[in-house]
Amino acid sequence: MEAAVLRNSVPPDRTAPFFGFVWAVVGLAVGVSAGSLLALPGELSRLPLAFWLMAALAVTFDARPFSPHAERRSMSVFPSICFTFAIALEWGPGPAIAVQAAAVLVSGWRMRYAPWRTIFNTAQYACALAAADAVVRLVPGDDFGATSRLRALDVLVAIGAAGAWLTVNHGLVATAVRLRFGGRWWTRIRQGLGFELLATGSLLLLAPVLVAAARTSPALVPMTVLPLYAVSRMARLSAEREQLARQDPLTGLANREALLVEVTEQVAVHAELAGKQAPDAQLALLLLDLDRFKHVNDALGHAVGDRLLIEVAARLTAAVHPPDVIARLGGDEFAILATRLDGVADARRVADRVVGELTDPVPLDGLPLDVGGSIGIALYPEHGADFATLMRHADVAMYDAKHRGDPVAVYAAESDHNSAERLSLLADLRRVLETGADDAGEIALYYQPQIAIATGEVVGVEALLRWRHPRRGMVDPEELIRVAEQSAVMRLLTRRVVDDVVEQLAKWSAAGLDLRAAVNVSVRDLHTGEIADQIAERLAQYGVPPSRIQLEMTEGALMADPRRVLATISRLDRIGVAIALDDFGTGYSSMQHLRRLPLAEVKVDRSFVLGMVADADDAAIVRSVIELAGALGLRVVAEGVEDERTWRLLHDAGCEVAQGWFFARPMPAEDLVTWLARYRPISPATRSGAGDSGTVGAERAGSGSRTRRDDGRGGRDNGRDGRGDRLGAQDNGRDGRGDRLGAQDNGRDGKDDGSGGQDDGRGGECDGRAARNGDRAAQLGERPGQPERPDRVDEPALGGRPAGVETPTTELDVLAAPVDPAAPVTTPGGPAKAEATARLHPSVE
């Protein structure tokens, strides 16, 4: 809002053109009024009492002009206009210009105008009065009011003169404002035109009435004081009401409505600056929300809270310099409009000053109260070009700052989960899921194989959801899952994936491929039993056994509401659906929860697997996760395997299954069948025996057949190449021997009965997992003591796979970045670091 210093200032880059125009107007005024002013001394003695009464009233009223707008003195109305225009009609321009100059001097002194402004106002009025006098002189015939009574022609002449006065005066002011502050010519001409026509026009049209009163009796002239005072009083009451409507009553700061007006005006000004490529063409809207203010209200009462807000307003006023604007939006929210900025660094400096002012405690009633706050910043034009957009983006940034624990945050699109673009994306996703609309794109599932490390056999595939949008192209999976996760669309997405997967399982089964699929689900899905009902219904519809599907959840989903999650997955487990824990190691799982849940598998997060070769800490974390999962009786899958060295490190650590671009890229379901037909298993032992370089650990002897799992009746050896035969994995170098039910080998010297293979030099070190009993427990990864599932017995092997290799598992993920399925499927050192595998749960890889 305009302060006195702002009303008298001129931007440095506009000084020359602006003052050039001011002095040109002054020169014009001198030229058009010099003659009449020089003749004025000889006329003073002949001027009647009515003139002197009008002159005195003009100067007196201008000492307190009408201000309909409380904060904008540029919109003030000067009653002297009425009297000086009447003097010009009756006694000519000379006396009128002299009286107007005296009135301008008084008003300029009262309003603390700069000398140049007072001079310009005098000149503009002189030009306007000269233009009005020219219209009067253009009328042929007798002079204005030649008779004692005003004629209809005289009234028409007065109206024409008033029009000329308004045109010249408003044109000069609009031009000066445009040269001073910038903007478009037509915008400046229209600005305030309605107010000028109503307020100033009314005063000008009152002038003929004053002339008629003066001709009748000078005593009638002072009677105009009462109506003018009534108009002035109403204007002041209107200004007070407007001020209350635009001012916060508690702090005296601007409110939201006033901020809206100011931002709108400043956006227009800065748009002009940006068009001229000025360096300071940006403005920033800063939104401040006090921390812990509710605690103050609740503990000490609202009266203390109000005093705290008043003190905060005073500190903000001290931190923010004019012409920047401070507003209280309500409650404990404040806004700051910072103008003429050179970039985000300038906006941050303003925010840092505010943070500094709020650092010290506020002492109230002897109690020091800490007043922290979070500030969000949105810049024009980068983050919005109108008040509503800037406010919304500043609000997003403010909550981002609160979430991160930082005092200041600048708006970032990735933090805005409710942007118009994302809402549009969500609407398109809903349409493609509900109706399959072509204009919303196409959704399809791709599959990436999972490989048993010890044997090289395919034991599963991970399915990745692709959405090719007709306008946006391939949708970023991380953005899509952030949008869908927070809405009911996630249920539609889960339902679509479950339906497609079960249908695909039925197709594979009909083609002789008995695959097991694992579908990732979100925390929203696990909070209700709807997903269990849906899976049971679809399995029955397509005739697919429950053992063919597996659900994956993240640690975050598990910890969000363990009680409800446990109830849901217990139902699924009773149906016969296996449960896997995804992204293991990135969340906050309780060991108690892991022990209680009916889990069959854990997946080591790719963030650890990718760094195994170069980072000893990542390698140590992966080994620890593998050992922990083994101790809990869980199968281990490693994601993100991109090169042979990682593959061998995982083998040495005892990991069972791996996936990544080292083995194959994602591909459509029909391409997967072709890929399976031409795929040839390769194990670490066979590659070592062939003389491959880059192995980790000692070379192992023997064929790849000795590295495979037992057929389920024998012991499962973890991390060794030597395996027991199908009847029991007897160790030649230890005191005990394993029985047919599956005793595990612990710490042997690496020699197995029937294998003849030498261990890899680690003394046949096992991964520490406890012995697991049961005919099928070793193969299926079931927990010790769990009842055997009849539907998992005698599952046919895939593609003539060797006896003892477990049934292939199809793992289902729901989002990933697009990958060309035609690319080579087995490449050493795969380039998959750019692969995105966003999930149906918040943890996105």
Image: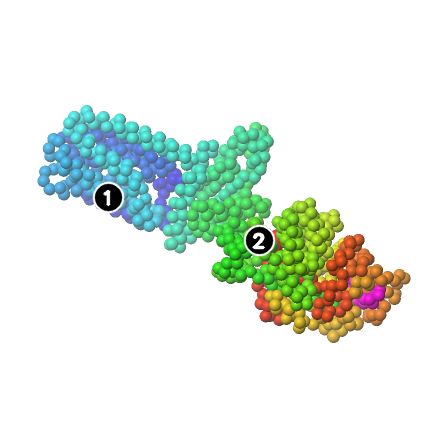
At label 1, which amino acid type do we have? Val
Camera-side residue of 473 and 63: 473
How crowded is the residue under tag 2: few (<14 C-alpha within 10 Å), some, or many (20+)?
A: some
Judged left or right of residue 569, residue 359 is left
Pinpoint residue 162: horizontal percent, then vertical percent.
21, 39
The residue labelled by disc 1 is 168
Tell whether 774 sits left or right of 50.
right
- Dot 1 surroundings within 10 Å: few (below 14), some, or many (20 or more)? some
The answer to whether 409 is drawn above or below residue 544 in the figure is above
Secondary structure type for disc 1: helix
Q: In front: 427, or 76?
A: 427
* 98 relative to 301 in the view: left or right: left
Q: What stretch is highlighted in magenta?
A: 718-729
Could you tell which of marks 1 and 2 lies nearer the N-terminus?
1
In the picture as drawn, the residue positioned furthest to the left comes out as: 141
Q: In terms of secondary structure, where does tag 2 sit?
A: helix
Q: In this view, does 88 lie above or below 282?
A: above
Foreground mark, 1 or 2, reads: 2
534 with respect to 689 (left or right): left
Above or below for 231 versus 615? above
Q: Are marks 1 and 2 in contact (CB under 8 Å)?
A: no
Residue at x 67%, y 46% (from the top left corner) = 564
Which quadrant does the C terminus fall into?
Answer: bottom right
Which residue position is annotated with label 2? 492
Q: In which quarter of the image is the N terminus?
A: top left
**Residue 644 x %, y %:** 69, 68
The alpha-carbon separation of the residues under discs 1 and 2 comes to: 68 Å
* x and y, in percent, of residue 689 in the image: 76, 73
The residue positioned 32% from the left and 36% from the top of the image is 76
